[in-house]
Amino acid sequence: MLVELEKARNRNNVVRIFREELDGPESWTDGFVVDANEEMVLLQLIDDSVHLNGYQILFLEDISDFVHPAPFNDFQKRVLALREEQVVDPEVDLEDLAVLLIDISEEYGLVTLHREEVEVDSCEIGRVVRADAVTYELEEIGSDARWFDDTFEYDLYDITRIEFGGAYEEALMLANDDMGDDAYELADDYEEDGLLVEEE
């Protein structure tokens, strides 16, 4: 698989990657291969509007199949060229997962981490403040763009997908930066669906 991924990178073609066990047979990822090693592949993603939209790191052991070139490779490349959008290497090192998470957090401000074998329908977004060979500590940001008061520790190798540098992460950081003194949770109470809920 690594040889084919390298071939796609050298030819600057779009690949379509499937992870059937984690995502099901009807879901896939389209993107350009930016880097790959024996364990991981780094993609620059193409969204449904045919824009480059951030980066994704997948683990080769989770990939059930991939298509090279992707079905709409020529169309996608033509549109991106007309829009003058080019693949950019974020220059992150795939060799050490713990170091990788710290580097992404420092360079991009936020990283989205999926642990799909533990939490199927959710993910955590934040900045990794500490990581070692076993665990990582995450300062999380909520969907209201406020940092949580506490940090949370997770098992490093529960991670199944890493995303960063996308439009959603950018939107959270943009809103958070604009909040000033309100950038963190300020009390034990928070609003949910328009109602004030008191934490127990």
Image: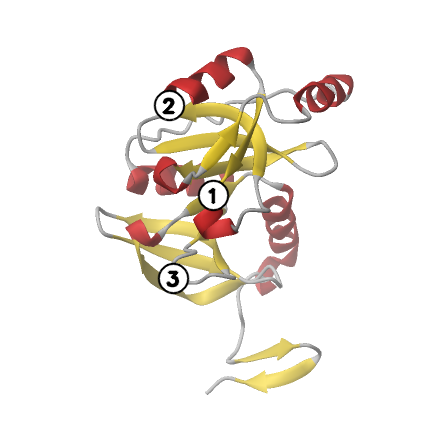
In what element is the residue under mark 1?
loop
Disc 3/disc 1 C-alpha distance (Å): 16 Å
Q: Is residue 71 shown above or below 198?
A: above
Residue 61 appears anywhere in the view: yes
Disc 1/disc 2 C-alpha distance (Å): 16 Å
Return the residue at label 3: 118
Disc 3/disc 2 C-alpha distance (Å): 27 Å
Amino acid tagged 3:
Val
Q: Kindly identify which numbered label has been placed on residue 19.
A: 1
Image depth: mark 3 or mark 1 in front: 1
- Of all residues, the one furthest to the front in this rendering is 25
Residue at the image position 31 percent from the left and 28 percent from the top: 38
Choose between 178 and 100: the one closer to the eye. 100
The mark that comes first in sequence, 1 or 2, is 2
Q: Is residue 93 shown above or below 61?
A: above
Pointer 2: residues within 10 angstroms few (<14), some, or many (20+)? some
Residue at the image position 37 percent from the left and 33 percent from the top: 40
The mark that comes first in sequence, 3 or 2, is 2
Describe residue 158's horizontal placement relative to residue 57 as left or right: left
Return the residue at label 2: 2
Pointer 1: residues within 10 angstroms few (<14), some, or many (20+)? many
